[in-house]
């Protein structure tokens, strides 16, 4: 089975997004209380860059997979997932811009911009959840993964066979076997009757 790159990379921006709000809040108050150097905020900027970069890579890999998945899933459903992903990545870009701006601002107003970064990061968490939810529906509800399973694993509609389909096929096979046995038994019975009639003669 061919494994696409999209489901591999997509976990990185999602995981980073859910970690960042707490880190932003901790760093902001530590810097405000002079328990941490302002230079430490570069760590937050670095994580924001990593989140946005992996988000863009996930978008790009998703577009590459779109042509394959369209064979088994309606385009409208795929585009809905793509739109959610684009909004999510847009939120990470906004958080990154605010993070960079906060680094160069004066200490008096820096904390307010840092709190704004935290709020945008929280919004990004919600957008990440909605994006992941629609991606999960593509795979588990609409059978997007079957596009990579090959013809031997795909059903008539391009989806994986269901247990019900397997059961019906096995029932047909069993009925054919039973019919063959019945024919075999009837032939044996005819042979026995012929032998008995010869013995009587």
Image: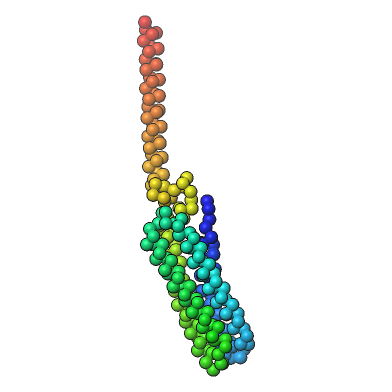
From the top left corner, tell me how far across and down residue 189 is, in percent. Answer: 38, 19
Taking the image as shown, residue 187 lies to the left or right of residue 51, namely: left
Farthest residue to the bottom: give it.
Answer: 108
Taking the image as shown, residue 93 lies to the left or right of residue 158, namely: right
Q: Is residue 99 above or below residue 14?
A: below
Q: Which quadrant of the rendered structure holds the C terminus? A: top left
Q: Residue at x 52, y 51 (%)?
A: 1
Location of residue 86 (image quadrant): bottom left
Q: Residue at x 37, y 42 (%)?
A: 168
- The colour style of the image is rainbow
Viewer can see residue 177: yes
Q: Residue at x 56, y 92 (%)?
A: 107
Location of residue 70 (image quadrant): bottom left
From the top left corner, tell me how far across and down residue 132 is, in percent. Answer: 46, 66
Q: Is residue 138 above or below residue 22?
A: above
Q: Residue at x 48, y 53 (%)?
A: 148
From the top left corner, tell me how far across and down residue 117 is, in percent. Answer: 50, 82
Taking the image as shown, residue 116 lies to the left or right of residue 179, namely: right
Q: Is residue 110 above or below residue 13?
A: below
Q: Number of labelled discs?
A: 0
Farthest residue to the top: give it.
Answer: 201
Viewer can see residue 16: no
**Residue in the foreground of this view, choosing between 180 and 38:** 38
From the top left corner, tell me how far across and down residue 4 is, in percent. Answer: 52, 58
Q: Is residue 157 above or below residue 171?
A: below
Taking the image as shown, residue 8 lies to the left or right of residue 180, namely: right
């Amino acid at each position: 089975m061919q494994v696409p790159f999209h489901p591999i990379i997509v976990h990185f921006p999602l995981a980073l997004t859910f970690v960042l709000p707490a880190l932003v809040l901790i760093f902001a108050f530590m810097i405000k209380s002079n328990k941490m150097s302002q230079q430490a905020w570069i760590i937050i900027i670095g994580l924001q860059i990593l989140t946005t970069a992996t988000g863009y890579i996930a978008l790009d890999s998703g577009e590459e997979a779109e042509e394959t998945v369209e064979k088994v899933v309606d385009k409208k459903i795929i585009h809905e997932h793509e739109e959610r992903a684009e909004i999510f990545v847009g939120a990470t870009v906004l958080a990154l811009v605010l993070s960079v701006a906060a680094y160069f601002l004066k200490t008096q107003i820096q904390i307010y911009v840092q709190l704004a970064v935290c709020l945008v990061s929280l919004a990004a968490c919600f957008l990440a959840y909605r994006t992941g939810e629609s991606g999960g529906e593509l795979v588990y509800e609409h059978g997007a993964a079957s596009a990579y399973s090959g013809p031997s694993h795909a059903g008539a509609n391009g989806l994986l066979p269901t247990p019900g389909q397997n059961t019906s096929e096995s029932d047909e096979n069993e009925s054919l076997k039973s019919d063959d046995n019945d024919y075999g038994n009837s032939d044996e019975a005819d042979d026995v009757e012929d032998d008995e009639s010869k013995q009587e003669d």
